[in-house]
Image (spheres, helix red, strand yellow):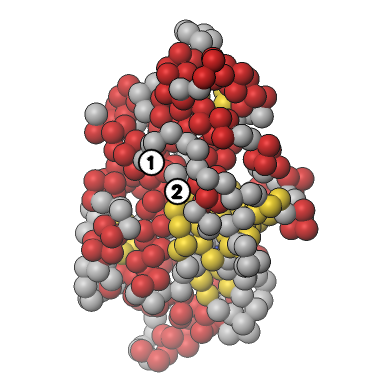
C-alpha cells in the first residue's frame, strides 16, 4: 500500500478535524452520514463539505451514496490520523521507506528529530483474514462494518503491550516506543528475517537460543503462536530478535499445548531443512541409546515449569485488558487455528513476492518527508474511549 506522506504536509487543521469527525462517526456507522460529520466537526459556514471533497481527493475517505450520502475512513485516512498523533507527541518527525509487508501489516522506517530511525508498524487486520472476520459477524453484530478499525487497533495495542512486557523481562524484542490507533512504534532491528539467511556461523548455538526462547516464554506464561523464520530477525553478529506479537496467548489457553508444539516444530523443521541441524549431537549428550526419531529432542509442554504468571500486571499497565485479549482471540487466534497447521506465514516465495511487488512503492530514505509538528486540532476524542464504546455498547 502506498503511503504518500507528502500529502500530510498540505493537510490543514480543518482537514484533520473532519477526518477525526469521520473516525468518531464510525463508532456506530458503517458509512457516516455527511450531516453527522458536519455536526461533529463543527466547522463554520458549511466548511465541512469543502474539506470532505479535499479528503476524498487524497483518498483518505471513501464516499458512499448507495443508501444515503456518507463517508468512511480508508486505511490511508486512518494511517494519517495515527501518524499525525505520533508527530504531535514528538515521537518522530519523518516517514521513510517501507521495510516490510507482512500478512496483516505494513512496516515503515520513521525518523526522530535527532536522526534516530525507528520502525512503524501499521496493522491491517482484515486484509487477509477478512473471510474469517466475516464469518464471525455474529460477534460484531451490527458493528461488523468497521471491524477492521477496531481489530487493527486492538492488534496494535496488544503487540505494544506484549513487546513492552517481554522487553521488561529481558527477552530480545524491539524496544516498544509508543502506540496509537493501529500503529506501533518500536526500535528498528538491524538485521534480516531468518528466512533470508542462507548460512550461519553457529547454527547449532542459534538453534538452541531460539528454542530456549520458546521455553523461557512458556515459563513466563506465554506462547508466541507464530514463531517461525519470518518472525525471528538475526543481525550480522548473529544476535536474535523476536518480532510480531498480536497472536500471542497464555499457557492457560485451551489450545496452549498445540500452539507450543507448533512453534517448536516450526523451528525444528526450518533448522533441519536450511542448516542441516545435527540433532544427533543433542541426542548423544542426553541419551546414548538409539533414538528412532528426533521427537524426543523436543521440549515438552507438560514439563514447562512456570516461573510466574508475569504478564497480567504488565499488560494491564499498558492498557491491554483481559477483555481485550478475549476480543482479539476470537479473531486472530482462532483465525490462526483455522488457517493451517503449519504456523508459517506463507511460503518463502510468497513472502519474497509480496516484498517485490511492493518495491515500486518504496521511497528512498533520502526523500524522507519531514513532517511539521503541529498543535493537535482534532476534536476531543480519546481513542481508547471510542474503542470501548464501540464494543461494549
Ligand atoms: P506481520 O504481522 O504482518 O507478519 P511483522 O511484525 O512480522 O508483521 O513484520 C513484517 C516484516 O517487517 C518483518 O518480517 C521484518 O522484515 C520487518 N520488520 C518488522 N518489525 C521490524 C523492526 N522492528 N525492525 C526492522 N524490521 C522490521
Ligand atoms: Mg510476521
- As drawn, is 124 to the left or to the right of 354? left
Res 197 visible: yes
Nearer the observer, 149 or 357: 149
Q: Are marks 2 and 1 in contact (CB under 8 Å)?
A: yes
Q: Can you say whether 95 is above or below 60 in the image?
A: below
Q: Say which mark, if any, is on residue 180.
A: 2
Residue at 38% x, 45% y: name it: 154
Residue at position x 23%, y 61% in the image: 312
The image shows residue 129, relative to residue 114, as above or below, that is above
Q: Which mark is residue 383?
A: 1
Residue lying at the far front of the rendered structure: 44
Q: Is residue 55 left or right of residue 257?
A: right
The tag earlier along the polypeptide, 2 or 1, is 2
Residue 236: percent from left, percent from top: 65, 78
Marks 2 and 1 sit apart, C-alpha to C-alpha, by: 8 Å
* Picture coordinates of residue 89, whole percent (x, y): 49, 54
Tell me if residue 56 comes above or below residue 197 in the rendering: above
Q: Is the residue 322 above or below the residue 393 in the image? A: below
Task: Please state which of residues 100 and 280 is positioned toward the viewer in this rendering.
Answer: 100
- As helix, strand or loop, the secondary structure at mark 1 comes to helix
Q: Which mark is residue 267?
A: none
Q: Quadrant of residue 223?
A: bottom left
Which residue is at a point 40% across and 71% down the rendered structure image?
A: 167
For label 2, the SS is strand
Q: Is residue 387 visible?
A: no
Amino acid at each position: 500500500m502506498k503511503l504518500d506522506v507528502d500529502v500530510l504536509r498540505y493537510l490543514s487543521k480543518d482537514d484533520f478535524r473532519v477526518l477525526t469527525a469521520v473516525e468518531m462517526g464510525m463508532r456506530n456507522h458503517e458509512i457516516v452520514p455527511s450531516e453527522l460529520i458536519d455536526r461533529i466537526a463543527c466547522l463554520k459556514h458549511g466548511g465541512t463539505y469543502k474539506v470532505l471533497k479535499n479528503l476524498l481527493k487524497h483518498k483518505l475517505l471513501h464516499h458512499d451514496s448507495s443508501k444515503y450520502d456518507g463517508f468512511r475512513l480508508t486505511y490511508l485516512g486512518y494511517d494519517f490520523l495515527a501518524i499525525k498523533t505520533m508527530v504531535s507527541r514528538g515521537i518522530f518527525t519523518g516517514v521513510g521507506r517501507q521495510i516490510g509487508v507482512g500478512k496483516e501489516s505494513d512496516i515503515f522506517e520513521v525518523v526522530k528529530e535527532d536522526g534516530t530511525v525507528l520502525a512503524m508498524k501499521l496493522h491491517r487486520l482484515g486484509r487477509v483474514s477478512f473471510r474469517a472476520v466475516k464469518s464471525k459477524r455474529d460477534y460484531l453484530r451490527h458493528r461488523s462494518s468497521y471491524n477492521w478499525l477496531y481489530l487493527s487497533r486492538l492488534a496494535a495495542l496488544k503487540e505494544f503491550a506484549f513487546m513492552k512486557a517481554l522487553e521488561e523481562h529481558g527477552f530480545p524484542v524491539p524496544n516498544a516506543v509508543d502506540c496509537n490507533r493501529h500503529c506501533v512504534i518500536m526500535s528498528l532491528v538491524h538485521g534480516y528475517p531468518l528466512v533470508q539467511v542462507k548460512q550461519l556461523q553457529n547454527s547449532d548455538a542459534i538453534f538452541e537460543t531460539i528454542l530456549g526462547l520458546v521455553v523461557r516464554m512458556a515459563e513466563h506464561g506465554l506462547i508466541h503462536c507464530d514463531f517461525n523464520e519470518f518472525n525471528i530477525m538475526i543481525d550480522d553478529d548473529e544476535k536474535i530478535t523476536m518480532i510480531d506479537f498480536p497472536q500471542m496467548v497464555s499457557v492457560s489457553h485451551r489450545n496452549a499445548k498445540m500452539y507450543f508444539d507448533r512453534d517448536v516444530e516450526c523451528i525444528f523443521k526450518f533448522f533441519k531443512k536450511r542448516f542441516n541441524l545435527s540433532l544427533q549431537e543433542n541426542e548423544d549428550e542426553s541419551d546414548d541409546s538409539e533414538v528412532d526419531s528426533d521427537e524426543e529432542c523436543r521440549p515438552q509442554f507438560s514439563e514447562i515449569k512456570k516461573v510466574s504468571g508475569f504478564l497480567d500486571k504488565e499488560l494491564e499497565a499498558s492498557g491491554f485488558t483481559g477483555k481485550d485479549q478475549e476480543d482479539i482471540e476470537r479473531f486472530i487466534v482462532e483465525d490462526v487455528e483455522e488457517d493451517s497447521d503449519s504456523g508459517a506465514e506463507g511460503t518463502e516465495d510468497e513472502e519474497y513476492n509480496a516484498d517485490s511487488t511492493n518495491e515500486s512503492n518504496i521511497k528512498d530514505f533520502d526523500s524522507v518527508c519531514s513532517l511539521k509538528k503541529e498543535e493537535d486540532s482534532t476534536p476531543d476524542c480519546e481513542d481508547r474511549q471510542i474503542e470501548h464504546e464501540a464494543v461494549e455498547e
